[in-house]
Amino acid sequence: MDNVNFLYDLLGENVLSIALVVCLPLVFVLVYALIAILAELKVSAWIQERVGPMRTGPWGILQPIAEVVKLLQKEDITPDRASKLLYNMAPFIIFTGAYAAFAVIPFSEYFIPAGINLGLFYVFAVGSISAIGLVMGGWASNNKYSLMGAMRSVAQLISYEIPAAMAILSIVVLASSMNMQEINHAQTGWFWNWFIFGGPGPISKIWVIPFTMVLCLIYFISSLAETNRVPFDIPEGESELVAGFHTEYSGMKFAMFFFAEYANMFVVAAILTTIFLGGWNSPFNTFMQGPIWGSFWFVAKACSVVLVQIWIRWTLPRYRVDQLMYVGWKVLLPISFVCFIAVSLFVMLK
Amino acid sequence: MIQYIKNIWEGISSSLIGMKITIMHIFVKNVTIQYPDKRFNLPENARNRLFMEMSKCTGCTSCARACPVNCIFIETVRVLPDDPHQEMLDTGIKRKLWLTKFDIDFAKCCYCGLCTAACPTDAIIHTKEYEYSVYDVKELLYHFHTLTPEQISEKKQMLADFQSKEKVCHPDEKTDAVKPAETKAKEDKPTEDKTE
């Protein structure tokens, strides 16, 4: 399939259009991160029956901007015994890892920064870059808490990547493609054509729906672990590790970690949207279907998933390390294998 | 195996119950009071900053003695019978003691309310005023006495003159001359304390 990109159609394939294509998701991430920070503050407040920030602007909507200004003004501390190069590189590598995944996120039918055929595979490959950044930051900080946090973080990432990969692989089997746009195109139509409901097909697909739903849940849980969000935030468990791998970071470098976390949240939500929730497809067949509506549906679906992540953060307590490993290896992995086999059988018999 | 599936089910269902509880709290009315804009209605018996009604105060020092943190400082001077400046208390009794000093240090005050309970004339009371932070701790020492510094020195001088005059008139009955006033004051206090 041709990769359709409206910017290339409009401006032709030159340096300017390529730069625009590269920058557009960055602009989106910046705006999204501010909104997500505000959402996090407000949702946490409402769940706890507070009102949240109210003093900065009407209803406190300027609070994230105030926080960014605050972080910019803060002193940038590098510990004396830290390995300077690695220490300074780590936050940027983590953000690079998070941002690199945006290259294959299909925002709309006519906009995907890089429509490569190995889209899902690429997402998984660059998703592991952040693990390098975490270990770098933790090791270079020369602080026992940072090192413990980094090691926990990597252990967690590796354990949870496998169930997530199995979930994605099942969808690859269902869609018989790794191209994000093709996966989206396969789900066009009513919402029961989404892969969470077994993908398009005759009514006989009904027996595969429970498996795809479980796979969606498995991917969601694993994505929480990959983004180090509660209840899987043991790498930065305050009660044990101060702040984990970013204990020593301050100012703008800390902001980069913060920013990368929110970017990562969106990446996993976007992948979940693409592979399970129909991506940029409207839930109502041709109603509100189209390139502009497509980006609306995509962002709306992904942001709902981000909201669920925030909701879970303020509901569940943190797992213990052994519980985390139990859930990862003994629950999610076998179940994801069973579901993978079931989905493969379904595709074989279809 | 059954235990394993039960565990998983319990994990999922309890998470969902938790999520149901938290989302219900989103729609509950917030408990936050936007403080400087809106204020909490204090109860009638709220104990905040103290206020002294000096026209009621007899100078009995009950409050200073009741205070557990010694934050009330009182000095009194006898009212002499030949003083042209005589005052009536709100209770209708003639003032017997001038209050040359009545200070309350709100940096020390613990708002226990023992002074208001001890006061025989209800002169010391709690108000609902609680916003009186200052940058200098010395500003929290409130002076409640109403006499001007000139009046205070005048009264003290008059008493000193009177006492020295007494000494000249009755050098051997010195103690007796001072006593009546003091004993009278002391007699008043216990009886009034009991009624309180």
Image (tube, coloured by chain):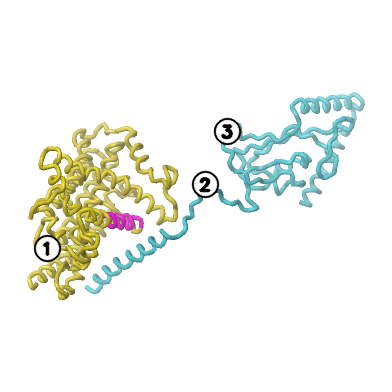
Cα distance, mark 3 to mark 2?
A: 24 Å
Q: Are marks 1 and 3 on the same chain?
A: no
| Residue that badge 2 annotates | B35
- Residue at 27% over, 33% down: A78
Q: Assess disc 2: are there few (<14), some (14-19) or many (≥20) residues with their C-alpha within 10 Å of its C-alpha.
A: few
Query: What chain is tagged by disc 1?
Result: A
Question: Please, what secondary structure does the residue beneath circle 2 have?
Answer: loop
Position above or below: B21 against A227: below
Q: Main secondary structure of the magenta part?
A: helix
- Magenta region, residue range: A302-314
Q: Colour of chain B?
A: cyan
> Where, by quadrant of the figure, is residue A80 drawn?
top left
| Residue that badge 3 annotates | B137
Q: Quadrant of the C terminus of chain A?
A: bottom left
A308 is within the stretch colored magenta: yes
Q: Assess disc 1: are there few (<14), some (14-19) or many (≥20) residues with their C-alpha within 10 Å of its C-alpha.
A: many
| Residue that badge 1 annotates | A175
Q: Amino acid at mark 2?
A: Tyr
Query: What chain is tagged by disc 3?
Result: B
